[in-house]
Amino acid sequence: MATGGGQAAAQPGTAALSKRIAGFLRSNGSRVVLHVDLDAFYAQVEMVRTGSPEDQPLCVQQWQGLIAVNYPARAKGIKRHCTVQEALALCPDIKFVHVATYSKGDHEARYHEDPKYATHKVSLKPYRQASARIFSIIERFVPPAHGVVERASIDEAYAELTEIVNRRIVAKFCAIADGPNGIERATAAWEALEYDEDGPEVEWGPDTCVVGLPDPPKTGDENESTPPERRTRGWQDYQLAEAASLVLDIRQAIRNELGYTCSAGIGSNKMLAKLVSALNKPAKQTALRTGAVLEFMRDLPFTKIRNLGGKFGEEVEAAYGAKNVSDLWKYSREQLQTRLGAQPGSWLYDAVRGVNSDEVVRRNMAQTMMAAKSFRPSVTSMEEVKHWLDVLGWEIHDRITEDFEANGRWAKTLVLHLKSPSLDKSRTCAFPPRHMCDGDIIAARALEMIKSEGEAKALPLMRCSLSAGGLFGDKGNGTIARFFGKKMDATADSGKEGAHVLEGDADVGRLEADGCEQDEDTDNPDNKNIATSSDLNSTSPSIKSFFASKPAIAIEETEEVPESFTCSRCGKSLLKSQQSEHEDYHFALDLSKESRVVLGGAGSGSGGSSVAGVKRKQPPGRSGTSDKKLTSFFKRE
Ligand code: CTP
Ligand code: CA
Ligand code: CA
């Protein structure tokens, strides 16, 4: 049984002790945030599904490209950008699994023997389903009453663990209160720690890598005592170590129940948790002690920090000739503000010291779902168009039915988008009601829309998409619905998942050069674009609508499209080359919303984020109006 919050024993006097410990931790501890990322995710899903041995090199293939490479294959030098031929040359006994596809007549995606780009369309459904199962395990350990789980992508999550960890610590001491003179013994045990000026001693278990400490011994002897160099002191370490034991439980549950390994980072905020989670991949967890943050960051290229990978990072580099985080330490907050603008300067000053107040936020479900196919070469006959409408119609049907089962909602609009030399247009009609809907009916409605547009104009067809829109009312009782909570506001993560595509014609770039192209399988969180626009791609939502639409994340909705990305914040689809600029834009927006941000995040109640044990108040000048710099971010958009 997962123990999210920890239970205080109902002994007389324990309430007072609980309160005392909780209060102490709030003022002496720090925030605890987790970042989890599945190892070679799609590859693991296929390993488990096909019963592949753990040491068998395996790649997930999409047409002629590889979209996931497991760790045994990586050991042979195979990388995601290798072609099938290159991978074979490096490892003749490599196993390839092609992603599931729809072909004509399929009512759901299948693992076809020899799928062809010309006739099949890929589906990410197996990965979406695996993702949902993983998230429901994480949420079991991090129940909404005491923590927050944020889906950052199909295989990544953040969790706010502060309150859960503190409750576990409280529960530990209250457990001592069971039995005769229990409360006296529990109080004494607590006071021995509380009154120790150096703070409690922490023994780091063999399952956690700790930044700055030697790796755990590999003896595998569980009874072996913790070597002295893996012992530290302090309340923040105490909390992190408690979190590490919880995170180990979560990772083991994912492993035991589903068969997947993941890596995890544990730190005092989202930025730090994410920075360390990939340090010891695969299948390891890494903790970053607050006392080790500055040393850890010193030689890190500052562009590794979230939001510094793009244009803003380039600007900083140009302004200061800086490369590593420590190159920026010599500038005061005011100096950075003068040069970069009040809010960006202040944000940067904090970030390079490991201070970051981003909250872990629950995300809403996407309100639209898209199935799209690009054609190379273009489709020239209506016969072929009908084939693809069938495939797309059944895909949308499959997914909307899956969504109905999980969340009890049904689409209201069906949007068709067509792109041909003489047309780049969307048309909308009512979505067939549930009791009389199937893929053929969806396809027939789409065909009617093409006919009313004029068949001649649609040909040669370069791209076609169908979207189900108006998926409102998250009255879900299923698992997926439970991941998404009340909070709609999102701080998206801009990791590698940026490569996913929501919409927009993204058939440019490497895969195509390899004779390998992508389809899309997309959910759009920003419903407005779909339902009302006459041209999806030309919709440019105002800043106001960004705030109003409260985007949910566009996860697991796309297929491998390395040269384009979908913004998980606003659902816009852009070329990969525009990604950093676009992320800067959101970054600027976030800064402008700073006044809204609560330092310390959900449940910490500490009113300040901290590094190296130093509490920080929200710096002045971080809220308020946009300055010139910010205005220029907005203009770019
Ligand atoms: N993915 C993709 N296209 C990309 C990046 C990722 O289709 N450009 C898919 C991959 O197939 C992958 C999943 O999204 O399995 C998660 O991506 P990521 O976490 O970046 O890589 P992993 O394959 O999980 O490998 P790692 O162990 O390094 O996290
Ligand atoms: Ca991963
Ligand atoms: Ca990932």
Image (spheres, rainbow, N blue to C red):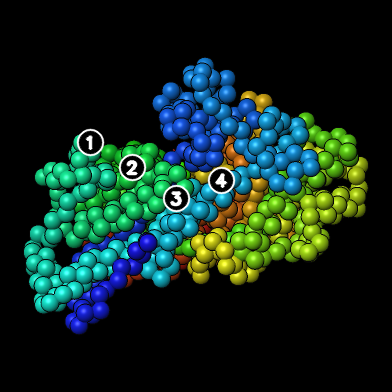
Query: Is 414 located above or below residue 42 in the figure?
Result: below
The residue singled out by tag 3 in the image is: 257
What separation in Å lies between label 1 and label 3 (alpha carbons)? 25 Å
- Camera-nearest label, 2 or 3: 3
- Camera-nearest label, 1 or 3: 3
Q: Is mark 4 within 8 Å of ligand 1?
A: yes
Nearer the N terminus, badge 2 or badge 1?
1
Name the amino acid, label 3: Glu
- Camera-nearest label, 2 or 1: 1
Toward the front, the furthest residue is 179
Nearer the N terminus, badge 1 or badge 4?
4
Nearer the N terminus, badge 1 or badge 3?
1
Name the amino acid, label 2: Lys
Give percent across and percent down for residue 600.
33, 65
Mark 1 secondary-structure assignment: loop
Mark 3 secondary-structure assignment: helix
Residue at coordinates 31% horizontally, 59% vertically from top-left? 32
Q: Is residue 168 visible?
A: yes
Of the pair 248 and 325, the residue shown nearer to us = 248
The residue singled out by tag 4 in the image is: 127
User: Would you say the residues marked 1 and 4 are in contact, meaning their CB atoms lie under 8 Å apart?
Assistant: no
Mark 2 secondary-structure assignment: loop
Name the amino acid, label 4: Tyr
> Residue 304's image quarter?
top left
Query: Is 56 located above or below residue 193 in the figure?
Result: above
- Camera-nearest label, 4 or 3: 3
The residue singled out by tag 2 in the image is: 284
Residue at coordinates 14% horizontally, 49% vertically from top-left? 231
